[in-house]
Amino acid sequence: MELLEYELDSLIKKLKDSERFRSEIDDIQNVYPFNRYEYIITKLVEEDVLSYEDYLELRNEYINRNLFLYVFEISAPRGFGDTWGFSHLLSVEPELKRPSRKTDSAYKGQYDLYLPYMGNNIRIEVKGSRAVDRNKPNEPLYMKALSSNSKKDFLMNFQQVKPTCCDVMLWFAVYRDCVKYWVLKNTDIYNLNFSPQHRNSETATRNENYKKTDIYEGQVMITRENISTIEKFQVEGRALRQAIIEKFEE
C-alpha cells in the first residue's frame, strides 16, 4: 500500500492544480465500491496524467504485490487456519491427506494431515500465521499486513504445538505477496524458543525448571530478531512432499 500511495502521489504532483485536488481527496466520502483510490485514478486518467495502458500496469503490479491480501480479511482464526490454510496446503501438495479413524484407528485429532509413504502414514502437525506489523495493534489485519520484503517488526506465534503427537511439523506464514513454508522434524522444536503454553498435568509449568522435552503443548514466537533460527527449515511449495519425507527419515 505504501508503494501505491507513493506512485499516486508522484502522479498527483503532475496535475495542473494538485493542491486543490489534494483538498478534494481529504473531503470525499468512502462508500464501497467508491473510494479515494478510484477517485484519484479517475482524475489522473481524465487529465491525461495516467494513460489507460499505464493504469493497467499500475493495477497489475499492485495485484502481484498483494496476491494474498484477501487472506488478512478472514477474521475468524478457524476460518484462516482450518478452512483457508488446509485448503491451500492441499492445493499446493495434493498428496497430503486429512486423517480420520478410518486411516488411523487411534486418531483423536492429535495431528492435522498425513502423507502416505512406503506403507507409512507420516503424521503432520500444521501451524499457520499471518505476517502483520506488530506496531499497529489496533488496526485491522488487512491494514497491517506485511509483504515478504518488509523491514517492519512482526510477530508470528505458532501455538498449541504438540511435538509428541506428530512425526513432522509443517508451518506456513502468509504475507501480502506470498506464502512461506517451513518443514521441521518433531524433535527440531527443542532447538527453538519452545515454551509451555498451558498449565496442566501433561505440561511443565513456567514456574518449574522444566526441560523442553517435558512440554506436551507449547508455543514458538517468531519475530524479526529470531526468524533466522528457522531459515534452514524453509522450503518452496513444490518441495513440500520431499522435505516431509526427508524429515521423517532423519
Image (cartoon, helix red, strand yellow):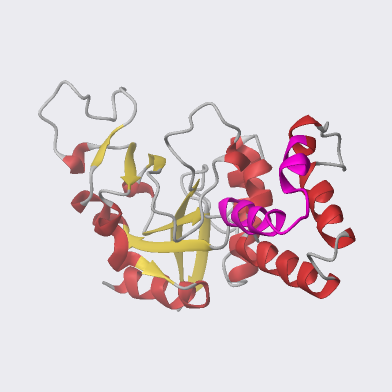
- State the image coordinates of residue 169 (x, y, percent, origin top left): 39, 57
Is residue 102 in sight in this rendering? no
Is residue 243 in sight in this rendering? yes
In reply to whether residue 21 is colored magenta, the answer given is: yes
Residue at 71% x, 54% y: name it. 12
Q: Which residues are magenta?
A: 1-23
Quarter of the image containing the C terminus? bottom left
- State the image coordinates of residue 6 (x, y, percent, origin top left): 59, 54
Report the number of numbered marks.
Answer: 0
Residue at 45% x, 58% y: name it. 124
Dominant secondary structure of the residues highlighted in magenta in the image: helix
- State the image coordinates of residue 8 (x, y, percent, origin top left): 68, 55
Residue at 79% x, 50% y: name it. 40
Residue 153 versus residue 97: which sits nearer the camera?
A: 153
Residue 136 versus residue 198: which sits nearer the camera?
A: 136
What residue occupies the far front of the structure in this picture? 16
Tell me if 27 is positioned left or right of 230 in this view: right
Residue 98 versus residue 139: which sits nearer the camera?
A: 139
Residue 66 versus residue 10: which sits nearer the camera?
A: 10
Tell me if 114 is positioned left or right of 20 in this view: left
In reply to whether residue 200 is colored magenta, the answer given is: no
Q: Note whether 229 is above or below 18 in the view shown.
A: below
Q: Note whether 238 is above or below 14 in the view shown.
A: below
Where residue 209 sits, quadrant-wise, is top left
Where residue 207 sits, quadrant-wise, is top left
Residue at 57% x, 31% y: name it. 139
What residue occupies the far left of the structure in this picture? 209
- State the image coordinates of residue 167 (x, y, percent, origin top left): 36, 59
